[in-house]
Every structure is written in C-alpha cells, then in structure tokens.
Image (cartoon, rainbow, N blue to C red):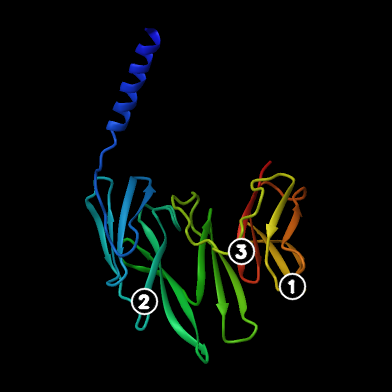
Amino acid sequence: MKKLILFLTLFILTFNLFGQINLEHSFTGNTPPTAFTTDNGVYYYTFDSESGELIIYNEAFSVYKTVSITMPQDYTYASIINIGDKLINDDSDIEFFLTYTQKVPVSGMVVRSQGFSKLYDENGNLIKDFEENYSIRILSNKLIEKEEDWSVTPHIYTTNIYSLPKSTISNVSFNDTDPDVTPAFPSPSSSNVHLPYSLPNGSSGVMKIFNIRGQLVEKIDLDGNLNHLNLNLHKYTPGIYIYEYNGISNKFTVKP
C-alpha cells in the first residue's frame, strides 16, 4: 500500500511539473531568432537579412529597440555573430556585430566569399569597421579579428588583437568559431594539452600562442606529418590562451 501511495504521489508531481511548461511567445524570421542575457534580464532579437532590420525585445516580449542598418552596395547580409550589453564596454547599451558578404571572382570560374563585419550599438551608431575579416571573437576583455589577403599567393593571414574598455566578461554566446578546427583537449588542463592542426603532408608551419592580453607567449614549429601538438603546460600560468596557425585559431584554458 505504501508503494502504491508513493507511486501515485510521484505520478502527480511529475504530471504537475510538465503541466507548468507553457508556450509564451513565438518569433519568426528569415534568420534564426536568438535569446541573450544582459544585466537587465533576458532579451530576444529577430533580424531580417533582406532589409537589415534588427528588432530587440525585452523579457516581456515588448519591442525594446528597432535598428535599421543600410547595407553596403553589392553586399548581402550574412548574420549577427555577437550581441550583448557588455560586449565591448561596461555601459548598459547593447552592441552587436553584423557581417556582410560578397561573391568575388578570383581566377577563371573560381569565386570566393569576401566579407567584413561592422560593430553597431542599439541606436544604430557605427562603432567600428572591421574590413576583409572572416572571424571576430571576444575573449574576456580582448577582441580577436582574423583577416585574409587574397591578393597574393600564398594567401596572407593576419590575427589582430584589440583591447576593450571594459572590466567585466561579456554576457554573450560565441558562434564564430572555426568550423573545421577540432577543439583543444583536454581543456582546462594543468599538465598537457593537445592542440590539433592540419597542414599539407610534409609541409611545415608555425603555431603562435598568445595570452589573454594578446602577448605572444611562445612560437612552435609544426610538423606536417603530424596532426596535433602536445603542449607542456608546466611553465604556463593559469588562464585562457589562444593558439593560432595559418590564420586559424582557437583557445585552451590552463587551470591551477
């Protein structure tokens, strides 16, 4: 009898728990609507990639801001890659990165996508242009931009690291990682970390490792016959590090 009572009690509690999940609101658009957190609570946005209109909603689903961006001629909107109220500074304004792309012929029938990013605030003010880049990433109080120069062969890749006027970590999810890069593992680690890389067989390369302040910590020659670097962390202080080779970068964390 006690088992039966216990079963019925658990059944009722489970039923009530699932009964509390209710649809509050639905967003639609030609790009995926997204939620993000701020110091003032949860916000949502929709972005129309045809018109360049960004609509930001507060937690009650009321319109907080409508931002209309004029698209550069011959370019198409790609996506909003980062958005948050503590993205680049400590004020309460929401900032966001908007990327644009353009198909550019390289040679013959070969076409590549050329893109750049612009940083705006919630009032539609342009804060900074980032031209000829293919990745923007924010780690703590650093902005990491990767550029590529297709005017020469082989292509030249440049990683620019900017300091940001803020003291807090952004309330933002990063979605601009390199899709072809296997993450470092194990991370965090206090002893060793495997840093995956890919080079043409038999070729060589150089891996650069930066600390979160953008300072070069170490340069290591890479062997094209291998697919990862086993890095000894005993001389590294705890924190976040960025490793980069051939314009490709990712991060790893050293724990105490």
- Depicted 171 relative to depicted 222: above or below: above
- N-term mark: 2 or 1: 2
Instruction: Determine whether, in the image, residue 206 is placed left or right of residue 188.
Output: right
Q: What type is the residue that disc 1 sits on? A: Asn
Residue 246 in view of the camera: yes
- Image location of residue 28, percent across then percent down: 27, 58
Q: Nearer the viewer, residue 8 or 149?
A: 8
Question: Looking at the image, which residue is at 24% across and 49% down?
Answer: 61
Q: Which residue bears the numbered disc 2? A: 76
Q: What type is the residue that disc 2 sits on? A: Thr
Q: What type is the residue that disc 3 sits on? A: Ser
Q: Which residue bears the numbered disc 3? A: 249
Q: Are marks 1 and 3 in contact (CB under 8 Å)?
A: no
Task: Specify the label residue 34 is tagged with.
Answer: none
Residue 213 in view of the camera: no
The local secondary structure at tag 3 comes to: strand
- Image location of residue 252, percent across then percent down: 63, 53
Task: Specify the label residue 201 is tagged with.
Answer: 1
Q: Are marks 2 and 3 in contact (CB under 8 Å)?
A: no
Q: Nearer the viewer, residue 110 or 94?
A: 110
Question: Looking at the image, which residue is at 48% across and 76% down?
Answer: 131
Q: In which quadrant of the rendered view does residue 247 lie?
A: bottom right
- N-term mark: 1 or 3: 1
- Depicted 71 relative to depicted 38: above or below: below
Residue at the extreme top of the image, as rendered: 1
Residue at the extreme left of the image, as rendered: 62
- Cα distance, mark 2 to mark 3? 26 Å
